Image (tube, grey):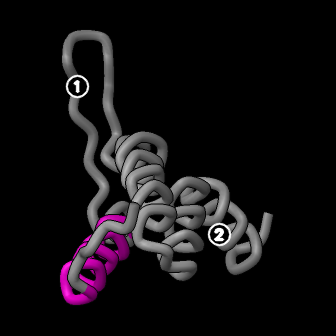
């Protein structure tokens, strides 16, 4: 079974994921609900991007695009990649 998805839509959603990945760097805020605090960066890096990454992996298998598979893996491991880049660029 082969799924047909426009390359323009794939590139647009990939650009949206990149902007979402960079947003914790540019925008940092927390929401407090009672005794709980929720961070935008934790929500994006630990919840939202891994879900998008799994969707990209499924799409990559269905439409047979290897670059989408790699992009999905990068979204799944976005927290680890971000922490590794921060350690490399900023030091311990």
Q: Quadrant of the C terminus?
A: bottom right
User: At x 50% / y 63%, what residue is drawn?
Assistant: 61
- 39 w.r.t. 60: above or below: above
Q: Is residue 34 above or below residue 10?
A: above
Q: Which residue is mark 1?
A: 32
What residue is shown with label 2? 86
Q: Nearer the viewer, residue 12 or 87?
A: 12
Q: CA distance from mark 1 to mark 2?
A: 26 Å
Dominant secondary structure, magenta: helix
Q: Position of residue 20 (x, y in %)?
A: 31, 66
Q: Magenta region: which residues?
A: 7-21
Q: Residue furthest bottom?
A: 8
Look at 59% across and 73% down and name the residue there.
70
Who is closer to the viewer here, 70 or 50? 70
Is 85 part of what is drawn in magenta? no
Residue 48 image position (x, y, % from top left): 35, 47
Q: Quadrant of residue 81?
A: bottom right
Front in this rendered view, residue 2 or 88: 2
């Amino acid at each position: 079974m082969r799924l047909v998805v426009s390359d323009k839509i794939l590139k647009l959603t990939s650009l949206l994921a990149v902007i979402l990945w960079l947003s914790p760097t540019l925008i940092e805020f927390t929401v407090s609900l009672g005794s709980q605090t929720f961070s935008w960066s934790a929500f994006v890096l630990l919840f939202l991007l891994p879900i998008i990454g799994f969707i990209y992996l499924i799409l990559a298998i269905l439409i047979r695009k290897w670059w989408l598979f790699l992009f999905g893996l990068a979204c799944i491991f976005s927290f680890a990649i971000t922490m590794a880049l921060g350690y490399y660029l900023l030091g311990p």
